[in-house]
Image (cartoon, coloured by chain):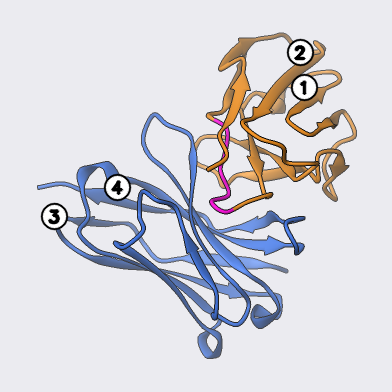
Chain colours: A blue, B orange
Amino acid sequence: EVNLTQSGGRVVRPGGSLRISCEVSGFIFVDYDMTWVRQVPGKGLEWLSGINWSGARTSYADSVKGRFTISRDDAKNSLYLEMTNLGVEDTGVYYCARVQGAGGREFFDYWGQGTLVTVSS
Amino acid sequence: DIQMTQSPTSLAASVGDRVTITCRASQYIDTYINWYQHKPGKAPKVLIYGASSLQSGVPRRFSGGGSGTDFTLTIASLQPEDFATYYCQQSYRTPRSFGQGTRVEI
């Protein structure tokens, strides 16, 4: 059974940093690209970042480029999102997801349960 | 960046209704579009990928169509468990943008 288990919710001050994680099981982690998506309160889903199976290629939404870093540790079957210079607008639920398919014919087939990140003073 | 625009933003419907949601891409995306269902407190769930392919385990009352810039998600006969927010998402270019969502409510 495929499972993506995310780290717990956190509260962080504006300007602060945070790393959230996503531990996977039930599939061969190194065979898949992975991604992060968030939902800000009262708004829709927002794609944030993606990383390919080897970790050699990463991509980011403009809203987080230069502040967020995606990474993976294949030995730990884990995906990470390092977030810096956080603002109140980054408050939301963050989801990790597995990428199925390739060459643009991609979709997100399994998702984590979500991590609530609250940026507040 | 590719913008995805859904319509309507919300709709009221009854059990048994046929519901159609549309999504327009700001540029050509072939059939590189996916549809997700999202319920409060739960993870999103993929329904349709590649514009018209039904994800395994998804009921056949869900269908997708379109190519180029205009796409549809249709629910043939709305069931109580289908009340949720639906999102389109393009996979043609990075960033992999989502539509703003369509809330389906009673």
The majority secondary structure of the magenta stretch comes to loop
Query: Alpha-carbon distance for marks 3 and 2?
Result: 45 Å
Disc 4 residue type (three-letter): Asp
Callout 4 secondary element: helix
**Residue marked by disc 3:** A13
Name the one closer to the observer, A113 or B63.
Answer: B63
Whether residue B106 is visible here, answered yes or no, is no
Q: Which residue lies furthest to the left in this view?
A: A121
Callout 3 secondary element: loop
| Image: magenta residue range | B94-99
Label 2 vs 1, first from the N-terminus: 2
Label 4 vs 3, first from the N-terminus: 3
Q: In this view, does A83 lie above or below B99?
A: below
Q: Residue furthest bottom?
A: A75
Query: How many other residues sit within 10 Å of disc 1, few (<14), some (14-19) or many (≥20)?
Result: few
- Drawn side of residue A14 relative to residue A81, left or right: left
x, y percent for residue A71: 45, 76
Query: Alpha-carbon distance for marks 1 and 3?
Result: 43 Å
Asked whether residue B30 is drawn in magenta, I would say no
**Residue marked by disc 2:** B15
**Residue marked by disc 1:** B79
Query: How many other residues sit within 10 Å of disc 2, few (<14), some (14-19) or many (≥20)?
Result: few
Mark nearer the viewer, 4 or 3: 4
Q: In this view, does A80 lie above or below B36?
A: below
Say which residue appears at 90% left-offset and 34% top-offset: B60
Q: Residue furthest right?
A: B60
Query: How many other residues sit within 10 Å of disc 3, few (<14), some (14-19) or many (≥20)?
Result: some
**Residue marked by disc 4:** A90
